[in-house]
Image: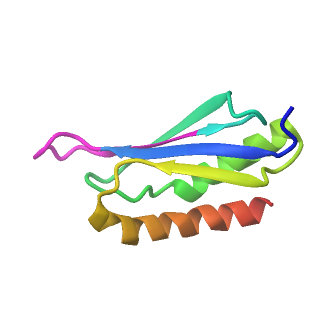
Amino acid sequence: MCNIAQIFVGADVGHPGPGVQKPSVASLVYSHDRLGVQYAALTSIQPPRTEKIQDLQKFMMTALNNFGYKNKASPSRLFFYRDGLSEGEYEAVGNEEIRDIESEFHHNS
């Protein structure tokens, strides 16, 4: 059995087709067991073509709280997989999202 409490998280933002002004959908999936085989998903709607996940702190709070409740411990490691960022977006969006994740992770540790 794994003695290290670790959480796996994946996130992406889906956008409508070109020229369509409908909202984008942000989503996050996370493991909520110590072995990383049971997952839950969270979604939200955000303004069209917005790549940064606006609800990321809220998503992470939910994921970390659910993980902690189920496992009676906060995770000691977090693996975050992010899809959908181009090289031009990575520095700005990626850094903002990393700050959001770190803020919640340290708050829940």
Q: Considering the image in quadrants, where does the N terminus appear? A: top right
Residue located farthest toward the left when viewing the structure as drawn: 19
Q: Quadrant of the C terminus?
A: bottom right
Q: Please tell me whether residue 26 belongs to the stretch shown in magenta.
A: yes
Query: Is residue 106 part of the magenta span, yes or no?
Result: no
Q: Which residue is most to the front?
A: 1
Q: Position of residue 19 (x, y in %)?
A: 10, 46
Q: Is residue 68 left or right of residue 56?
A: right
Residue 103's place in the image compared with 26, above or below, is below
Left or right, residue 97 beside residue 91: right
Q: Which residues are magenta?
A: 15-29
Identify the residue shown where x is 62% and y is 50%. Answer: 79
Give the side of residue 23 with respect to residue 3, left or right: left
Q: Nearer the viewer, residue 84 or 59?
A: 84
Q: Is residue 100 above or below residue 68?
A: below
Q: Position of residue 56 (x, y in %)?
A: 53, 55
Q: Which residue is depicted at the point 83% across and 46% down? A: 4
In the rendered structure, the answer to whether residue 49 lies left or right of residue 90 reads left
| Quadrant of the rendered image containing residue 103 | bottom right
- Viewer-closest of 14 and 81: 81
**Secondary structure mostly taken by the magenta-highlighted segment of the chain:** loop
